[in-house]
Image (tube, grey):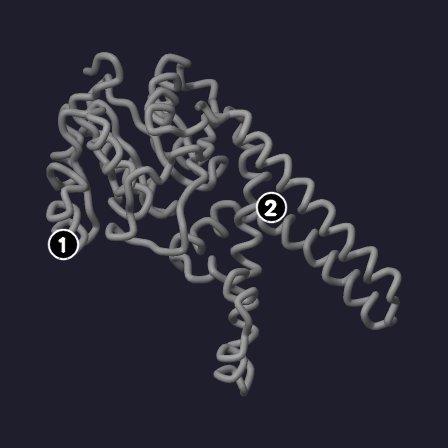
């Protein structure tokens, strides 16, 4: 198996931004004797080998053979079909984990289709990434000083959760534990909603007759704000579908805010508008300050 957190064989299913970055770091830090990639396309497979991101590329059944750890780094809706396919091929000691952004739906789907895998599955979510996607967007050190959320379940023993936590800590990440529901609720508001808003704003502008002029004259703030609208569309479609209830709640809450500021602008209520904007500025500044203070406190010199 492994000693002192060195695996014999780690399998990354989906060698894209997150999966590729994870493979790079595992190799760089010598945390596994062999890192195997399972790729959806021949182009990705060739790039993963030529860039030395993985040691080998194998099909799913072959890759599962004697694997210590299998990491699912596919779009959310592809994970359970992959698990169904690999279930007959994995050994009794193989640990399974993921890097997905939604947990409750994934847990429910696994419990329905392959419940026998829950006792070896550790639900994990690295809060890292970017608007670029694909294997060539991957990079070493992506997870340094980033949070990784592990959502504990009653089926998975603390021993294997601890192994996955140690892996992320070895990569420089800060591991937090929370429930499936809390995870999905938090990231629907802080990650999924902002992406939907960015996509919507870009679509609003692109639907205008003078869209070319609008995009040409848009200031840097617009492109900063909408940077995440360049993110992988398939991945974010899957996130919205698999975290539908929490995303809808977040959208409804945001709509209330839009309705409020629209009413204030319609009334030309200067005091209300000033208060609305000032309240947001204060909240963001305080939140950012606390974030910087926490990072400084956790930095080791």
Residue 227, how many percent across, how many down?
47, 60
First of labels 2, 1 by sequence position: 1
Contact? badges 2 and 1 (CB < 8 Å)? no
Residue picked out by circle 2:
189
- Nearer to us in this view, 225 or 262: 225
Of the numbered discs in the image, which one, if any, rests on residue 81? Answer: none
Residue 232 placement, left or right of 34: right
| Res 157 seen here | yes
Residue drawn where x is 37% and y is 28% of the image: 172
Q: Quadrant of the N terminus?
A: top left
Residue drawn where x is 55% and y is 25% of the image: 297
Q: Quadrant of the C terminus?
A: top left
Residue 273, how many percent across, how many down?
82, 62
Q: Is residue 104 above or below residue 197?
A: above
| Res 116 seen here | no
- Nearer to us in this view, 30 or 151: 30
Q: Residues within 10 Å of mark 1 (few under 14, many from 20)?
A: few
Of the numbered discs in the image, which one, if any, rests on residue 42? Answer: 1
Task: Report which quarter residue 80 is drawn in.
Answer: top left
The secondary element bearing badge 1 is classed as: helix
Residue 298, how many percent across, how many down?
51, 25
- Name, please, the residue furthest toward the bottom: 209
The secondary element bearing badge 2 is classed as: helix
Task: Report which quarter residue 190 is drawn in.
Answer: top right
């Amino acid at each position: 198996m492994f000693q002192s957190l060195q695996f014999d064989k780690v399998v990354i299913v989906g060698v894209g931004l997150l999966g590729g970055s994870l493979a790079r770091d595992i190799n760089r830090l010598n945390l596994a004797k062999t890192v195997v990639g399972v790729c959806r396309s021949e182009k990705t497979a060739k790039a993963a080998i030529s860039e030395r991101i993985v040691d080998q590329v194998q099909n799913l059944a072959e890759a599962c053979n004697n694997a210590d750890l299998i990491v699912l780094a596919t779009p959310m809706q592809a994970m359970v079909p992959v698990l169904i396919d690999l279930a007959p091929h994995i050994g009794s000691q193989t640990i399974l984990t993921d890097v997905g952004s939604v947990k409750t739906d994934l847990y429910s789907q696994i419990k329905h289709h392959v419940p026998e895998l829950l006792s070896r599955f550790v639900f994990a979510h690295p809060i890292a990434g970017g608007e670029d996607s694909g294997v060539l967007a991957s990079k070493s050190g992506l997870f340094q000083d980033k949070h990784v959320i592990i959502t504990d379940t009653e089926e998975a023993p603390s021993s294997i959760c601890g192994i996955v936590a140690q892996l992320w800590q070895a990569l420089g990440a800060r591991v937090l534990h929370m429930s499936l529901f809390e995870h999905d609720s938090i990231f629907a508001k802080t990650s999924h909603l902002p992406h939907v808003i960015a996509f919507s704003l870009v679509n609003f502008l692109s639907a205008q007759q003078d869209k070319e002029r609008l995009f040409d004259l848009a200031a840097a703030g617009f492109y900063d704000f909408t940077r995440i609208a360049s993110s992988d569309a398939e991945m974010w479609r899957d996130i919205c579908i698999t975290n539908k209830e929490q995303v809808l709640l977040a959208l409804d809450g945001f709509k209330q805010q839009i309705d409020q500021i629209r009413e204030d602008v319609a009334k030309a209520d200067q005091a209300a508008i000033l208060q609305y904007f000032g309240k947001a500025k204060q909240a963001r500044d305080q939140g950012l300050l606390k974030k910087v203070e926490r990072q400084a406190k956790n930095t080791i010199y």
